[in-house]
Image (spheres, rainbow, N blue to C red):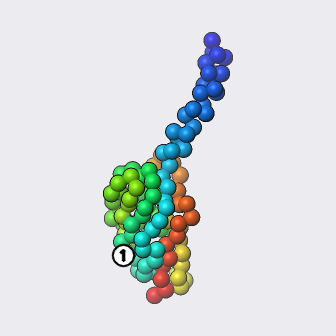
Amino acid sequence: MRGWCYSALLLLQPLFLPFLEAAKPEITSLDPVHGPSTGGTKVVIEGKKYKSSDRVFFGPSEAQDVVVKSDTKITATAPPSRIISPSTAVSVTVQRSDSEAISNGVRFTYDAP
């Protein structure tokens, strides 16, 4: 009986995989895509599968005033840049407590002071 149950689980595993993958957030665009290195830029993050518990990061720094408006839109305030160099581009990531951070290669550029 035990072997049968294990075999059944292996056969059913592919059926559940799409549901697990579908739960990951996806970033498709930012508006605006740049702002001052001092932070404070209100950014609209468009994408898919957002949840109210999602967190947003600009590079290593957590965004301020994050509001998940819908499952496709988040607003967040860019934090000050932690990198001291002119025109620094950082990855914007959405992180869910139960999964890794998702970026999709979308970047925000901090303008030179």
Q: Nearer the viewer, residue 29 or 84?
A: 29
Q: Is residue 79 visible?
A: no
Front-lying residue, 15 or 57: 15
Residue at the far bottom: name it: 113
From what the image shows, is residue 106 above or below residue 39? above
Please tell me which residue lies in front, 31 or 86.
31
What x and y, as percent, mark residue 9? Answer: 60, 25
Residue positioned 53% across, 82% down in the render = 87
Q: Which residue is denoted by mark 1 in the rendering?
A: 40
Above or below, 52 against 88 in this view is above
The kind of secondary structure element at disc 1 is loop
Q: Is residue 20 at least partly visible in the picture?
A: yes
Report the residue at 42% width, 81% height from top: 36
In which quadrant is the N terminus drawn?
top right
Q: How many numbered discs, if any? A: 1
Which residue is found at the position 46% from the left and 87% from the top?
Answer: 113
Q: Is residue 98 above or below residue 102?
A: above
Looking at the picture, which amino acid does disc 1 mark?
Gly
Q: Quadrant of residue 85?
A: bottom right
Image spot of residue 18 (x, y percent): 55, 40
Crowding near the residue tagged with mark 1, few <14, some 14–19, many ≥20 C-alpha atoms within 10 Å: some
Q: Give x and y (percent) for residue 10.
A: 64, 27
Q: Position of residue 23 (x, y in %)?
A: 48, 45
